[in-house]
Amino acid sequence: MKLHRVTALVLRHLYLYQRSLPRMTEVLFWPLIDLLLWGFVTLYLQRFQANLPKFVTFFLGALILWDILYRAQQGISVSFLEEVWSKNLLNLFVTPMRPSEFLAALLTISIAKLLTAGLASAFLAWLFYSFNLFVLGLSLIPFVLNLALMGWAIGIITMASILLYGQEAEVMAWGLAFLVQPVSAVFYPVSVMPAWVQPIAWMMPSSHVFEGMRAVVETGAFPVEELVKAFILNLFYLSLALSFFYRNLRVVKEKGLLLRSGTE
Amino acid sequence: MGHPIVQVDHLTKSFNGFVAVNDLSFSIEEGEILGLLGPNGAGKTTLIQMLLGLITPTAGEIRILGFDLKRHREEILSQVNFSSTYISMPTSLTLRENLTVFAKLYGIKKPEHRIDELLEIFEIKRLKNTITRHLSSGQLTRLSLVKALLNRPKVLFLDEPTASLDPDIADKTRTLLKSIRDQSRLTLLYTSHNMKEMEEISDRILFLHQGRILASGTPAEILRLFAERNLEDVFLKVARGNHSLEPPESRP
């Protein structure tokens, strides 16, 4: 892997963002809207559910952490779509760039996006609701890492699908993460789900992260078991996503579809 | 002319039973400009994409600069470049930004000088800090050609590079490409639907039809073979099926 090629691709996105107000606000606007909407709903509900322990922490913590997963996924899939929209894919693929370098650049952009959105959300939650995300302590680091890994797996699957099926699959960039949200135990525990849904929920790394987060808030204990399970599942899904990406790249080259992805 | 820089042996590509490129074998010598000619569907785009590693061949072998493309993609593509009217560059970036990104992708150290030099040659240096979306189609084509020359390629694949240029800039571009070829022994594979241009720029022409080589030779040899006065008439003859020429391998 050549670092100069990875930095070149990252530079391309930095140039893009530095003068694009819509793109810059997109990173911050939706987390802010989510935070305002759900933050006020949480405060309102808390008035009537005063006996529900640490309601604000559960809800706002979950909201900010979910956004990290979403931003990680968007950092991959939307950055890839930028190349499709600007008909730049062919230009990139005729350079000596390796697919792994392309992926490394997208991961770097994704990290920048999720850190920006995550820190901005954490600051706004503190400003508006006096909520301190860092009450989660050191466990916050593996929570964020696991959610980013899951976001990247979803992002790579989305990118691989767009590569093979063209812009028809673009909708996945906006919707695929939300497809797993109901079974990710973000705002409610796995135990409230119907019995037949629970095994599916336990297959999601995100369920283990959010259950772990609730455990930290309630007991203060570091949720080692949940984090290990989340990490193992993430490694599995990430390997699956990478195999899917390389398989689709091979098929696209065999079927001559790269020209379509690059020019349609 | 020198030794073969591009060597294609028995190259075939089929898509679900449809044979787009059928058992092609040819070579391009160092410093040669090979014009690739043929009606729509002749297999030109598929061939160029296989030469760039964007399409995997069904059969056959491609060697560029002495390397097997299948095994040495990275070494080859760092010394090759491509420009086409049909692909674009990010329109929200300035010319300088776009070219800096590609220069870094090709590992060019301190690329500012090379970028300025090429922008000057193609007469778009004053637009260096202009957002790419504000360029005319002719200026975009010149930007694409600047990109294609950034890494001082040894082999250049140009797909209709002058399609949107006015006659003055198109003529300057052809002259420039010939001058670069003369100075640096650049090898070029060139496609165009402008027959006069093909006649003028090509040292040799490869005439493709239905995925096969119908004829190969200097422009004068092609005209003699088809008994026509210009390439336009040759092209119309082939495209409309008014010829009795068989691919060389089918001839007795």
Image (cartoon, grey):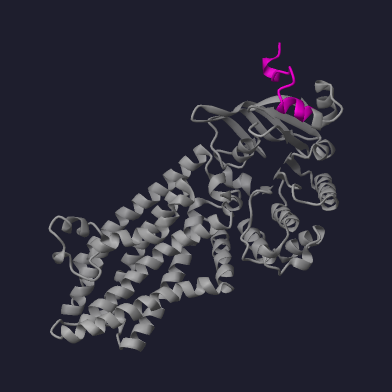
Is A32 situated left or right of A188 in this image?
A: right
Residue B218 seen in the current view: no
Residue B201 visible here: yes
x 61%, y 57%: residue = B105
In the rendered structure, the answer to whether residue B88 lies left or right of residue B56 reads: right
Q: Is residue B71 left or right of residue A214?
A: right
* Rendering quarter of residue B114: bottom right
**Residue B221 percent coordinates (x, y):** 83, 25
- The residue sitting at 78% across, 35% down in the picture is B2
Q: Position of residue A44 (x, y in %)?
A: 24, 84
> Is A21 placed left or right of A202 in the picture?
right
Q: Give the residue furthest to the top.
A: B252
Magenta highlight range? B234-252
Q: Is residue A184 magenta?
A: no
The mark tally for this picture is 0
Measuring from the top left, give residue B101's x and y in whole percent.
62, 62
Position of residue B136 relative to residue A121, above or below, is above
Q: Nearer the viewer, residue A115 or A26?
A: A26
Where is B69 relative to A218, above or below?
A: above
Residue at the (76%, 30%) spot, across then down: B235
Q: Is residue A31 above or below residue A85?
A: below
Q: Is residue B249 magenta?
A: yes
What residue sits 51% from the left and 41% below the top? A253
Instruction: Report x, y in % for residue B110.
Output: 69, 65
Looking at the image, residue A53 lies above or below residue A97: below
